DNA sequence: TCGACAATTAGAACGTGTTCCAAATATTCT
DNA sequence: AGAATATTTGGAACACGTTCTAATTGTCGA
């Protein structure tokens, strides 16, 4: 955990080892990152072919049983890859826009940019996360990660309420769920091959705009309607 | 194909065998239904445990290789079970309601009733359909079935447009996609265990209502807003 | 009726995710 | 330093989806 993208795992930096509790725990964390990194590289290089636990283990230089000790299942490893790739919350914090609704769509564009810039990688990831034949099936994100994300979106929506753009009768929780479902539905269609990558962004944005417009005050309704039509055009052009 | 729910497969009724082209084709169709039925019964009895191809084949009284000859993959068999269970279009046609929007929600309730009345069964089915580790991955429905459903929904939406309830600037195609994504997002959350069965209906309906309200005319906006608040209440009570 | 032919069959095989085991290894505690 | 302990390791094993082979079955055309 707390794996950063651009550090190399070195044996040497034990100076601050007291932070992670003993040496044993540190070695475990190191194996963890090696495994996650091996899985990531394999997906990057060959898509979902060759993404077997035996391959991941060999690449990470560990035994086949070790990923099961540290993660529990292949799905958990893939989930770790997924969450490791996304420094979302960091970039999320420094988003700026003219009003709360523009901010929502800026956040949406940011979230989508990951998938659009590296479709092969994230499609493989998503498809692997949809495989719930195992026992636990923790959903598409770690519980704490999920809750953090939801809270961030709720805050964005509440800002829109404060600016008088959406009706306060529709709870931020309600709206957040609706937006999340719209996005996940689009992602699902995309992962299943029913939606081309170029249509993913506009489709999800359209779902956002429609749901927000459904909860909008007269003040917020205008810009949202315009956004809906813009997304619709973009989709029509794409076809 | 053309499998009806409540007929028993009998060897005797060959009188109208000329309808299906030769005897060979008929035997093949019979094996098909036996396999689908075996898979359905296994899911009904034991959930996703024991839903192996070897089990299905044994139960259907065929060899392990036969399902592969007739369907191609386990996923295709499950998809056949899924589509066999749903005499949706039949019941869909005879829906009645005061106005087009009520009709949309009546159709939605009908669609959801399958899942809510037999959650175990359909959750297993959905989870199995999400497994796309195989090659083809035809999505959540057969192409022709999918297109038929989409057309039906589009017709419903166009009726709402004709009655002046939703803005014609928002295409029926656009709106249909938005509704479909909202529903699929809710189904996904449900299948992954993030949404309890009791919340599935209201959540999906809420997504529908919000998206429709986002495209509504002043005439349609009122009832939709009321519906949104009703769904929200229902969800709040459920928690 | 009989040969041609299409499909199913049994069975083995491959690679997969996952689990179990005894043995080896490294760390922690006293 | 030496004992106790936690983890990894190699290896085998299981059930699974899927594919392949040769042999067999039952149906169709002449």
Image: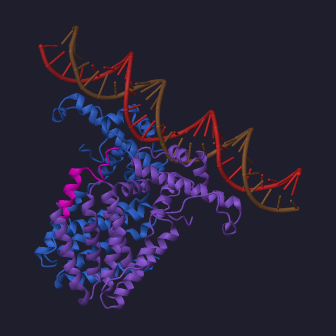
Chain colours: A purple, B blue, C brown, D red
Which one is nearer the viewer's eye here, A78 or B239? A78
The residue range painted magenta reads: B135-154
What's the residue at 36%, 75% (across, down)?
A107
**Relative to B133, is A199 above or below?**
below
| Residue B30 x, y percent position in the rendering | 29, 36
In this rendering, does residue B93 appear at all?
no
What's the residue at 41%, 33% (across, down)?
B64
| Residue A208 x, y percent position in the rendering | 29, 74
Q: Residue furthest front?
A: A12
Q: In which quarter of the image is residue B213?
A: bottom left
Q: In which quarter of the image is residue B140?
A: bottom left
On screen, residue B11 versus residue A58, left or right, reads left
On screen, residue A126 versus residue A222, left or right, reads right
In this rendering, does residue A138 appear at all?
yes
Which one is nearer the viewer's eye here, A188 or A24? A24
**Relative to B85, is A168 above or below?**
below
| Residue A35 x, y percent position in the rendering | 54, 53
């Amino acid at each position: 955990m707390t794996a950063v993208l651009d550090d190399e795992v070195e044996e040497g930096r034990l100076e601050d080892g007291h932070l992670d509790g003993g040496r044993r725990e540190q070695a475990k964390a190191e194996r963890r990152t090696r495994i996650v990194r091996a899985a990531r590289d394999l997906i990057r290089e060959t898509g979902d072919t060759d993404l077997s636990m035996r391959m991941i283990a060999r690449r990470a230089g560990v035994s086949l049983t070790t990923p099961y000790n540290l993660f529990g299942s292949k799905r958990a490893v893939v989930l770790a890859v997924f969450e490791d790739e996304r420094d979302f919350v960091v970039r999320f914090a420094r988003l700026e826009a003219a009003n709360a609704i523009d901010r929502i769509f800026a956040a949406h564009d940011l979230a989508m940019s990951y998938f659009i810039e590296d479709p092969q990688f994230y499609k493989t990831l998503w498809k692997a996360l949809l495989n719930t034949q195992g026992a636990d099936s923790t959903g598409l994100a770690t519980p704490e990660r999920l809750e953090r994300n939801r809270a961030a979106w709720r805050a964005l929506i509440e800002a829109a309420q404060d600016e008088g753009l959406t009706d306060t009768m529709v709870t931020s929780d309600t709206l957040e769920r609706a937006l999340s479902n719209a996005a996940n539905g689009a992602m699902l269609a995309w992962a299943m091959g029913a939606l081309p990558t170029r249509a993913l962004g506009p489709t999800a944005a359209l779902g956002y705009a429609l749901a927000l417009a459904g909860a909008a005050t007269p003040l917020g309704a205008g810009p949202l309607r315009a956004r809906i039509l813009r997304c619709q055009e973009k989709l029509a052009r794409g076809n």
